[in-house]
Amino acid sequence: MKKRRTMIEVPGNKSKMLEKARDFKADVLVLDVEDSVPRTTAGKSDARALIGKFLEGPPPLAGEIAVRINAAESEWFFDDIHWLVGKNPATVILPKVRSCREYIFIEELLDRIGIAPSIGTMIVVETPGSLVELNEIARSSRRLTGFVAGGFDYSIEVGSTALNPMCGLGGEMIQTHLALLRQTIVAVARLHGLNAIDGPLLARAKDDAALRAAVLAARANGFDGCMVFYPPMLDTVHELFSPTDEELHWARRINEASAAAAAEGRAAFQLDGMVILPHHVTMANRMLASR
C-alpha cells in the first residue's frame, strides 16, 4: 500500500498553477481534467494539452502523479481515455463511478487501448451506486489502489443540505451525514489492502481550525490521508497524519515494556498505572512504522 497522506488537485487548464505545482511537496499531485475545468469541449481540450506538456517537463517534487479524468457518463470520457495513451501517470482517478459493472468496463477499456498494467486506478466514491457496490468493485479489480471520499458530490447525490454553509445559508458544515460513506470506504480499503483518502468538507479555504478538526477526524476514522485543493493545507495535513514526538516516545516505551513482559511470559502489563494490551503494542508499531 502506498504512502498517501496528502493529495492535492490542480486544474489542468491553468498553466501557471501547473508550473507552481511542480514544487508542491504532496504525496500525490492530481492533475485534473474534471471538476476544476470548465464543462466545455474547449476547456477539456485545453486541460489535456497543458497536462501533456507538464508531463513532458521536469519531474515535480510530489511522490506520485495522478490524472483525474471525466466520468464515464460524460461526453468527454472517451477523449480522455484515448488521450491517456502514452502519458503514463502513476494513477488514473475515476470520478462518479455508478456501479461495479461500470468500473469493470472502464478497467477493460484501459486494457484494450494499451494503458500499461502498472498504471493504477483510484475511485472517487461519490455516488450511492459505487458506495453500495464498493466491496464488489475492489474484489473485481486488477488496477485499483485506493478510494477517495467524495463528500461534495455524494451530498448532492443523496439530497443532503450539509453543504448549505458553502452557499452562504449559515450554520456549520455537517460532517456526520458522511459517516456511512467514510466508514464503508475505510472498511473495504482495509479488507483489500487499498488506500483510503478522505475529502474534508470545508466552507472556506483559509479556515485553519476547521481544517485541523476535519483532518484529525479523518485520522481518527482510519483514513491514510486527505485530498485538498489549497496548497497551504498540505503542511497541516502532513503534520496531523504524522505521529507526534509524544506519540513516538510513547510507542518506544510500549515496545520496550512489551519485550520485558514477553520475556516474563505476559501479554498484558502495566505502564504508568495503565493496563497495556496487545492492541496497544500494535498501535505502537504502526506509529513507529509511519514516521
Image: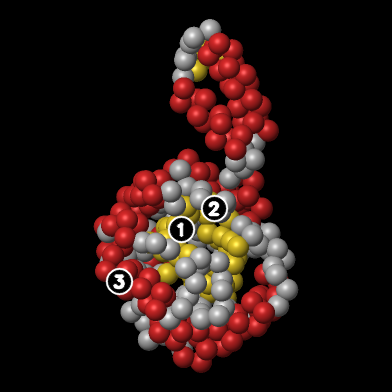
Q: Secondary structure at mark 1?
A: strand
Amino acid type for the residue under numbered disc 3? Glu
Quarter of the rendering containing residue 28: bottom right
Quarter of the rendering containing residue 243: top right
Can you give x and y, in whole percent of width and height, for residue 210 in the image? 54, 51
On the image, numbered disc 3 is attached to which residue? 102
Can you give x and y, in whole percent of width and height, for residue 231 in the image? 65, 63
Instruction: Kindly identify which numbered label has been placed on residue 145.
Output: 1
**Between residues 211 and 166, which one lies in front from this camera angle?**
211
The residue that appears at 62% across and 31% down in the rendered structure is 247
Q: Secondary structure at mark 3?
A: helix
Q: Residues under labels 1 and 2: Cα distance?
A: 8 Å
Q: Earlier in the sequence, mark 1 or mark 2?
A: 2
Q: Residues under labels 3 and 2: Cα distance?
A: 25 Å
Amino acid type for the residue under numbered disc 2? Lys
Q: Secondary structure at mark 2?
A: loop
The residue that appears at 40% across and 84% down in the rendered structure is 78
Q: Earlier in the sequence, mark 3 or mark 2?
A: 2
